[in-house]
Image: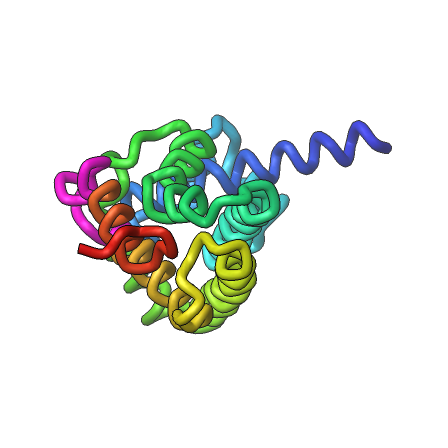
Amino acid sequence: MVSRGMNFDMTIDNIRIAALRLFLLRGYRNVSLVDVAKEIGITKGGIYHYFSSKEELFHSVICYLFDYFGAKYAKVFDQEKSFRRVLEVMIGGEQDGYIERLLNMKQGDYQANNAGLALEIMHNFPEIQERIDRSQLELRNIMEKKIQIAQETGEIRRDLEAQILATIVLSVSNGLKVLGHNLNTKAMQQQVINSLWQLIGANIPKE
């Protein structure tokens, strides 16, 4: 029974990953269940064994993606003592590395379609957008607590409102994602981190 369960999990995750890869590359409207089945070498009937429709698969894919990122972020916020290090993860491109490793594809392959897929979700899947909004709120709350700890240890200025700062960091991180691959470079990410740190760091010398 354990083996069957593990095979089930592996198969359904393979379908989700293949579907996510195609949705990012082509957008929701331009991907069919046949396309997903071909991507992993199974029949369309094999897809229907797990999902009754493309819409159900899409819902499952988005939930899977947010659970994946949630686990990654929880580990970062739990293990990293420095908030500067948290900034490097949130803004410095490590999120893209998570996607690249999960999907076995490069950022430039899919980044141009990110905004289009986000718009499709906003316009056609309000329940998914609500899930995204909840996840963003949860992430902001976790980051707020991390900022408060950094203020207590003297890493970040104590006069800053933790909730507002968490909102700004999250907004900057999300904003960089929608930039073209040629704009959202490692150099740009590092400049953003350095500039933000100049504003919030407690021990930055004043000119």
Location of the N terminus (image quadrant): top right
| Residue drawn at (48%, 71%) of the image | 130
Q: Main secondary structure of the magenta part?
A: loop
| Residue drawn at (67%, 37%) of the image | 9
Residue 31: x %, y % from top left:
34, 47
Residue 140: x %, y % from top left:
48, 64
Furthest toward the left, the residue is 182
| Residue drawn at (28%, 59%) of the image | 199
| Frontmost residue, 31 versus 161 | 161
**Residue 131 visible within the image:** no
Location of the C terminus (image quadrant): bottom left
In reply to whether residue 184 is colored magenta, the answer given is yes
Above or below residue 184? Residue 166 is below
Instruction: Classify residue 38 as left or right of residue 45.
Output: left
**Residue 89 visible within the image:** yes
| Frontmost residue, 40 versus 170 | 170
| Frontmost residue, 140 versus 5 | 140
Above or below residue 137? Residue 69 is above
| Frontmost residue, 76 versus 115 | 76
Q: How many marks?
A: 0
In reply to whether residue 93 is colored magenta, the answer given is no
| Residue drawn at (53%, 66%) of the image | 141
Above or below residue 102? Residue 192 is below
Residue 45: x %, y % from top left:
56, 40
Residue 192: x %, y % from top left:
23, 49
Span of residues in magenta: 176-188
